[in-house]
């Protein structure tokens, strides 16, 4: 594994990581809430925590379809500054202008 993104606990924000991956996959907080048997509002609070418990990490990883290590260990500086890491359609060209003369 790349040592730039692992084992630097001071820069790891597990809640933010969980949220990033959940949003990247287009999964709503409600789906996580159902799996954890908590409210959507409680999921919102979880995603603000720096550290998450093992059960929460396991549920996020299962629902999102990623390895738990990404949530546990990915640091903010792993993503290049200004990169559009997640696919969200915002950078797609919605229509192309075609000259039909």
Image (spheres, grey):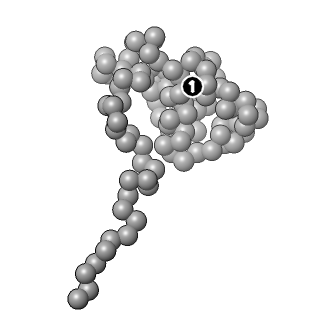
Up-down relation of residue 78 to residue 95 (above or below): above
Name the residue at 47% across, 18% down: 12
**Disc 1 residue crowd, few under 14, some 14–19, many 20+, Cα 10 Å:** many
Q: Give the residue number, with chain letter if any, for mark 1.
A: 15
| Quadrant housing residue 80 | top left
Q: Quadrant of the C terminus?
A: bottom left
In the image, residue 28 lies at what x, y percent? 63, 44
Up-down relation of residue 90 to residue 44 (above or below): below
Q: Secondary structure at mark 1?
A: helix
| Quadrant housing residue 36 | top right
Residue placed furthest toward the left:
101
Of residues 77 and 97, the one nearer the viewer is 97
Name the residue at 68% across, 27% down: 45
Q: Is residue 32 left or right of residue 20?
A: right
Q: Quadrant of the N terminus?
A: top left
| Quadrant housing residue 73 | top left
In the image, residue 62 lies at what x, y percent? 56, 35
Up-down relation of residue 7 to residue 42 (above or below): above
In the image, residue 85 lies at what x, y percent? 38, 40
Q: Is residue 14 visible?
A: yes
In the image, residue 41 lies at what x, y percent? 73, 34
Of residues 71 and 16, the one nearer the viewer is 16
């Amino acid at each position: 594994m790349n040592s730039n993104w692992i084992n630097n606990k001071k820069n790891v924000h597990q809640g933010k990581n969980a949220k990033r991956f959940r949003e990247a996959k287009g999964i709503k907080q409600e789906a996580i809430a159902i799996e954890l048997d908590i409210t959507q509002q409680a999921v919102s609070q979880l995603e603000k925590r720096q550290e998450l418990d093992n059960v929460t990490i396991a549920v996020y990883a299962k629902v999102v379809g990623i390895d738990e290590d990404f949530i546990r260990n990915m640091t903010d500086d792993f993503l290049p500054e200004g990169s559009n890491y997640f696919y969200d359609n915002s950078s797609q060209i919605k229509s192309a202008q075609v000259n039909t003369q």
